[in-house]
Amino acid sequence: MLDVTDLSVSYGAIRAVRSISFTLRKGELVSLLGANGAGKSSTIKCIAGALKASGGTITLEGKDITAASPEQVVRAGLATVPETRDVFPDLTVAENLMLGAFIHRRDQAGNRDNLEKLNTLFPRLAERSKQAAGTLSGGEQQMLVIARALMARPRVLLLDEPSLGLAPAIVERIFEMIETLKKSGLTILLVEQNVNQALAVADRAFVMRLGAIVASGTAEEIRSTSDLSAHYLGG
Ligand SMILES: Nc1ncnc2c1ncn2[C@@H]1O[C@H](COP(=O)(O)OP(=O)(O)OP(=O)(O)O)[C@@H](O)[C@H]1O
Ligand SMILES: [Mg+2]
């Protein structure tokens, strides 16, 4: 589904991602773990087209998207929820959602169908559809940015730390929602600091440290890797 090969990302002299390779198979949920500064967000941003790769290739369903713009990446079938969790604060929930459907502007009927499905998945958003997005709680805003990404009807979804800074009950709900999305057949790359929960929902996982992948395997293998905490906490 998604093939990342020898991908590198640099900020000037800083090499944030150092020739990493991994694959997401169709319908899989893969967790990307690693300490602060490991290069997780840089990887996500580069796949999303928001950062230029300094080396390597990214292909989505066989199509080379390495040099694609963010819009081209979304059109190719991959949507991203960045760690910044940006909503348009003065627009309503419904307006924010419709912006997520910008690549399907001409398919209003399809957008309405999709919105209905998302309302079932996110009842709290449905109740607040006319509320200004800036007045939502942190957890509701996270739900909104995820729902907005889904309005693009992606086949692959990248989530950058969706549970960050949220209360345990909301984190629980976000993980349940991620499992529901996985069951619907979506292919998901989940960046998380929350190792136990990320491994509980993942088929496979890999661990980044200092821009490189230092461990990868099934969620079970990663969980039982004795030096995971060293890799994970070692920065
Ligand atoms: N815009 C930037 N300019 C310069 N260096 C950057 C920039 N963004 C990130 N970096 C550096 O790249 C490295 C990787 O950062 P990145 O944000 O990808 O890590 P991360 O794994 O997502 O960390 P976190 O868990 O804190 O979100 C870090 O050393 C960081 O300081
Ligand atoms: Mg990050």
Image (cartoon, helix red, strand yellow):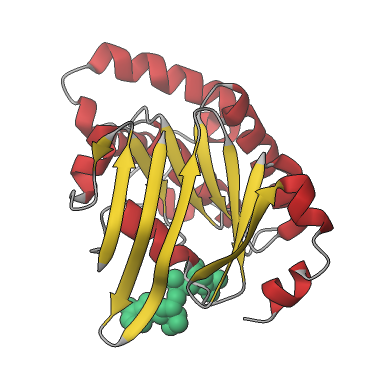
Residue 59 vs residue 49, the one in the foreground: 59
- 72 lies left or right of 13: left
Query: Considering the image in quadrants, where does the N terminus appear?
Result: top left
Residue nearest the observer in this picture, 73 or 21? 21
Is residue 84 depicted above or below 162 in this figure?
A: below
Image side of residue 45 versus residue 129, left or right: left
Count of labels in the image: 0
- Quadrant of the frame with the C terminus: bottom right
Please provide percent x and percent y for residue 137. Answer: 57, 54
Q: Residue 178 at what x, y percent from top left?
A: 61, 37
Image coordinates for residue 225, horizontal then vertical, percent:
79, 61
- Name the residue rendered at 36%, 27% in the picture: 153
Q: Is residue 29 above or below residue 9?
A: above
Residues 92 and 186: in front is 186
Q: Residue at x 77, y 72 (%)?
A: 229
| One can see residue 171 in this view | no
Q: Position of residue 134 (x, y in %)?
A: 42, 55
